[in-house]
Image (tube, rainbow, N blue to C red):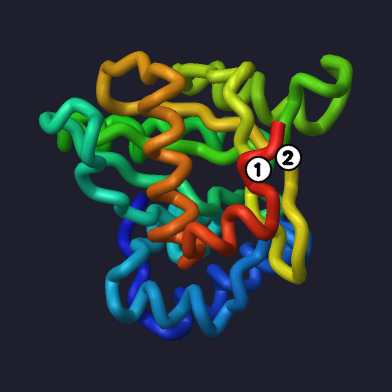
Amino acid sequence: MIKELSSQSDLDKAMEIYLEAFPPEERFPVEKLLSRFKNREELIYGYFSGEELIAIATIFPLGKIAGINEENTFSVLNYFAIHHSHRKGGVGKRFLDSIIKAEKEANSALIFEIENPYNGDESSVEYARLRFYRRCGCREYPDFVYNMPAFGGGMVNMRLLAAGAEINLSDIELSLIRESIYKQMYYLRDEDIERIGLLNV
Protein backbone atom coordinates (compact mmCIF):
# COMPACT_ATOMS: atom_id res chain seq x y z
CA MET A 1 0.00 0.00 0.00
CA ILE A 2 1.17 3.53 -0.82
CA LYS A 3 -0.01 6.62 1.01
CA GLU A 4 1.05 10.16 1.78
CA LEU A 5 2.58 10.32 5.26
CA SER A 6 1.26 12.74 7.86
CA SER A 7 1.17 11.09 11.31
CA GLN A 8 4.09 11.73 13.61
CA SER A 9 4.79 8.02 14.04
CA ASP A 10 4.98 7.50 10.27
CA LEU A 11 7.23 10.55 9.85
CA ASP A 12 9.52 9.38 12.66
CA LYS A 13 9.94 5.99 10.96
CA ALA A 14 10.43 7.71 7.59
CA MET A 15 13.24 9.82 9.02
CA GLU A 16 14.94 6.67 10.34
CA ILE A 17 14.95 5.22 6.80
CA TYR A 18 16.14 8.58 5.43
CA LEU A 19 19.06 8.94 7.85
CA GLU A 20 20.18 5.37 7.25
CA ALA A 21 20.03 5.63 3.45
CA PHE A 22 21.78 8.93 2.65
CA PRO A 23 25.25 10.27 3.49
CA PRO A 24 25.43 13.59 5.40
CA GLU A 25 26.48 15.65 2.36
CA GLU A 26 23.26 14.65 0.56
CA ARG A 27 20.85 15.21 3.45
CA PHE A 28 18.65 18.19 4.18
CA PRO A 29 18.42 18.82 7.93
CA VAL A 30 15.57 16.69 9.31
CA GLU A 31 13.87 19.74 10.86
CA LYS A 32 13.85 21.50 7.48
CA LEU A 33 12.38 18.50 5.72
CA LEU A 34 9.67 18.06 8.34
CA SER A 35 8.79 21.76 8.00
CA ARG A 36 8.47 21.36 4.24
CA PHE A 37 6.22 18.32 4.67
CA LYS A 38 4.04 20.17 7.19
CA ASN A 39 3.64 23.15 4.85
CA ARG A 40 3.23 20.83 1.83
CA GLU A 41 6.16 22.47 0.05
CA GLU A 42 7.42 18.91 -0.37
CA LEU A 43 5.34 15.73 -0.28
CA ILE A 44 6.35 12.44 1.34
CA TYR A 45 4.91 9.06 0.43
CA GLY A 46 5.38 5.71 2.11
CA TYR A 47 5.23 2.15 0.85
CA PHE A 48 3.82 -0.26 3.43
CA SER A 49 3.95 -4.00 3.89
CA GLY A 50 0.95 -4.52 6.12
CA GLU A 51 1.42 -1.93 8.86
CA GLU A 52 5.18 -1.65 8.38
CA LEU A 53 6.64 1.33 6.53
CA ILE A 54 9.38 -0.10 4.31
CA ALA A 55 10.12 2.63 1.75
CA ILE A 56 9.81 6.40 1.33
CA ALA A 57 9.75 8.88 -1.52
CA THR A 58 9.78 12.66 -1.21
CA ILE A 59 8.66 14.81 -4.13
CA PHE A 60 9.40 18.51 -4.49
CA PRO A 61 7.01 20.20 -6.95
CA LEU A 62 8.65 22.76 -9.23
CA GLY A 63 5.45 23.51 -11.16
CA LYS A 64 5.59 25.02 -14.63
CA ILE A 65 8.96 26.32 -15.79
CA ALA A 66 9.10 29.32 -18.13
CA GLY A 67 10.66 28.45 -21.47
CA ILE A 68 9.53 24.80 -21.43
CA ASN A 69 6.35 23.28 -22.87
CA GLU A 70 3.58 24.92 -20.85
CA GLU A 71 1.50 21.73 -20.92
CA ASN A 72 3.98 20.08 -18.55
CA THR A 73 4.74 20.60 -14.91
CA PHE A 74 7.88 19.34 -13.19
CA SER A 75 8.72 17.74 -9.86
CA VAL A 76 11.92 16.43 -8.33
CA LEU A 77 12.14 13.00 -6.73
CA ASN A 78 14.23 14.45 -3.93
CA TYR A 79 14.69 11.30 -1.84
CA PHE A 80 13.84 7.68 -2.58
CA ALA A 81 14.88 4.98 -0.12
CA ILE A 82 14.03 1.42 0.79
CA HIS A 83 14.58 0.08 4.31
CA HIS A 84 17.77 -2.01 4.24
CA SER A 85 15.90 -5.20 5.17
CA HIS A 86 13.59 -4.92 2.12
CA ARG A 87 15.99 -4.02 -0.69
CA LYS A 88 15.46 -7.29 -2.54
CA GLY A 89 12.26 -8.56 -4.06
CA GLY A 90 11.19 -5.69 -6.31
CA VAL A 91 9.77 -3.29 -3.70
CA GLY A 92 11.70 -0.34 -5.12
CA LYS A 93 10.56 -0.90 -8.69
CA ARG A 94 6.90 -1.36 -7.73
CA PHE A 95 7.01 1.80 -5.63
CA LEU A 96 8.77 3.92 -8.24
CA ASP A 97 6.59 2.59 -11.08
CA SER A 98 3.53 3.76 -9.13
CA ILE A 99 5.01 7.23 -8.57
CA ILE A 100 5.99 7.61 -12.24
CA LYS A 101 2.54 6.44 -13.36
CA ALA A 102 0.85 9.06 -11.15
CA GLU A 103 3.14 11.81 -12.48
CA LYS A 104 2.49 10.74 -16.07
CA GLU A 105 -1.27 10.83 -15.54
CA ALA A 106 -0.86 14.39 -14.20
CA ASN A 107 1.20 15.33 -17.30
CA SER A 108 4.14 15.99 -15.02
CA ALA A 109 7.78 15.13 -15.62
CA LEU A 110 9.65 13.68 -12.65
CA ILE A 111 13.30 14.72 -12.41
CA PHE A 112 15.90 12.59 -10.59
CA GLU A 113 19.31 13.56 -9.23
CA ILE A 114 21.69 10.59 -9.22
CA GLU A 115 25.37 10.33 -8.36
CA ASN A 116 27.29 10.40 -11.63
CA PRO A 117 27.56 6.74 -12.74
CA TYR A 118 29.49 7.44 -15.92
CA ASN A 119 32.88 8.05 -14.29
CA GLY A 120 33.18 4.54 -12.88
CA ASP A 121 32.82 1.04 -14.19
CA GLU A 122 29.66 -1.00 -14.50
CA SER A 123 30.30 -2.80 -11.20
CA SER A 124 29.98 0.41 -9.16
CA VAL A 125 27.09 1.16 -6.80
CA GLU A 126 26.32 4.28 -8.85
CA TYR A 127 25.96 2.21 -12.02
CA ALA A 128 23.73 -0.29 -10.23
CA ARG A 129 21.42 2.59 -9.33
CA LEU A 130 21.40 3.71 -12.96
CA ARG A 131 20.40 0.21 -14.08
CA PHE A 132 17.51 0.33 -11.59
CA TYR A 133 16.26 3.64 -13.00
CA ARG A 134 16.64 2.29 -16.54
CA ARG A 135 14.38 -0.63 -15.61
CA CYS A 136 11.81 1.93 -14.50
CA GLY A 137 11.92 3.62 -17.91
CA CYS A 138 13.82 6.76 -17.00
CA ARG A 139 15.43 8.89 -19.71
CA GLU A 140 19.15 9.62 -19.29
CA TYR A 141 21.04 12.84 -19.95
CA PRO A 142 24.64 11.65 -19.46
CA ASP A 143 26.35 14.64 -21.09
CA PHE A 144 24.51 17.37 -19.20
CA VAL A 145 26.55 18.60 -16.23
CA TYR A 146 24.68 18.78 -12.94
CA ASN A 147 26.35 19.49 -9.62
CA MET A 148 24.31 19.20 -6.44
CA PRO A 149 25.11 21.68 -3.66
CA ALA A 150 26.52 19.61 -0.80
CA PHE A 151 25.30 20.29 2.70
CA GLY A 152 28.26 21.59 4.63
CA GLY A 153 29.79 23.20 1.53
CA GLY A 154 31.05 22.30 -1.91
CA MET A 155 29.17 20.17 -4.38
CA VAL A 156 28.52 16.59 -5.46
CA ASN A 157 28.89 15.59 -9.12
CA MET A 158 25.53 14.22 -10.23
CA ARG A 159 23.46 13.63 -13.36
CA LEU A 160 19.79 14.20 -14.13
CA LEU A 161 17.22 11.65 -15.27
CA ALA A 162 13.59 12.20 -16.16
CA ALA A 163 10.41 10.13 -16.29
CA GLY A 164 6.68 10.69 -16.43
CA ALA A 165 5.60 13.09 -19.15
CA GLU A 166 6.70 12.00 -22.61
CA ILE A 167 9.26 14.68 -23.31
CA ASN A 168 12.87 14.67 -24.49
CA LEU A 169 14.56 17.62 -22.83
CA SER A 170 17.13 19.77 -24.65
CA ASP A 171 20.24 21.15 -22.93
CA ILE A 172 18.53 24.58 -22.77
CA GLU A 173 15.49 23.06 -21.07
CA LEU A 174 17.70 21.07 -18.70
CA SER A 175 19.51 24.32 -17.82
CA LEU A 176 16.18 25.94 -16.94
CA ILE A 177 15.25 22.93 -14.79
CA ARG A 178 18.66 23.01 -13.09
CA GLU A 179 18.22 26.70 -12.26
CA SER A 180 14.71 26.06 -10.93
CA ILE A 181 15.98 23.22 -8.70
CA TYR A 182 18.79 25.37 -7.32
CA LYS A 183 16.51 28.31 -6.56
CA GLN A 184 13.35 26.56 -5.43
CA MET A 185 14.53 23.37 -3.75
CA TYR A 186 17.91 24.54 -2.45
CA TYR A 187 16.98 28.22 -1.88
CA LEU A 188 20.07 29.46 -3.74
CA ARG A 189 20.47 32.93 -5.24
CA ASP A 190 22.40 33.70 -8.43
CA GLU A 191 25.40 34.82 -6.39
CA ASP A 192 25.32 31.58 -4.35
CA ILE A 193 25.31 29.48 -7.52
CA GLU A 194 28.28 31.40 -8.88
CA ARG A 195 30.19 31.37 -5.57
CA ILE A 196 29.87 27.60 -5.15
CA GLY A 197 30.76 27.05 -8.81
CA LEU A 198 27.79 24.78 -9.49
CA LEU A 199 27.77 25.56 -13.20
CA ASN A 200 31.44 24.72 -13.68
CA VAL A 201 32.07 21.89 -16.11
How many residues crowd around disc 1 within 10 Å: few (fewer than 14), some, or many (20 or more)?
many
| Residue at x-position 39% and y-position 49% | 180
| Residue at x-position 71% and y-position 59% | 150
Question: Is residue 106 rendered to the left or right of residue 146?
Answer: left
**Residue, disc 2:** 157
| Residue at x-position 83% and y-position 15% | 122
In the image, 86 versus 62, the foreground residue is 62
Residue 105 percent location from the top left of the image: 17, 31
Q: Which mark is residue 147?
A: 1
- The amino acid pointed to by label 2 is Asn
Residue 132 percent location from the top left of the image: 61, 25
Q: Is residue 76 above or below residue 122?
A: below
Which element is circle 2 on?
A: strand
| Residue at x-position 33% and y-position 80% | 38
Q: Quadrant of residue 18?
A: bottom right
Q: Are marks 1 and 2 in contact (CB under 8 Å)?
A: yes
Which residue of the protein is positioned furthest toward the left in this rendering?
A: 71
Question: Is residue 11 rendered to the left or right of residue 100?
Answer: right
Q: Is residue 187 above or below residue 154?
A: below
Residue 13 percent location from the top left of the image: 56, 73
Q: Which mark is residue 87?
A: none
Q: Is residue 182 above or below residue 12?
A: above
Question: Is residue 85 rendered to the left or right of residue 111?
Answer: right
Q: Quadrant of residue 26?
A: bottom right
Residue 87 visible in this rendered orientation of the protein: yes
Q: Quadrant of residue 15?
A: bottom right
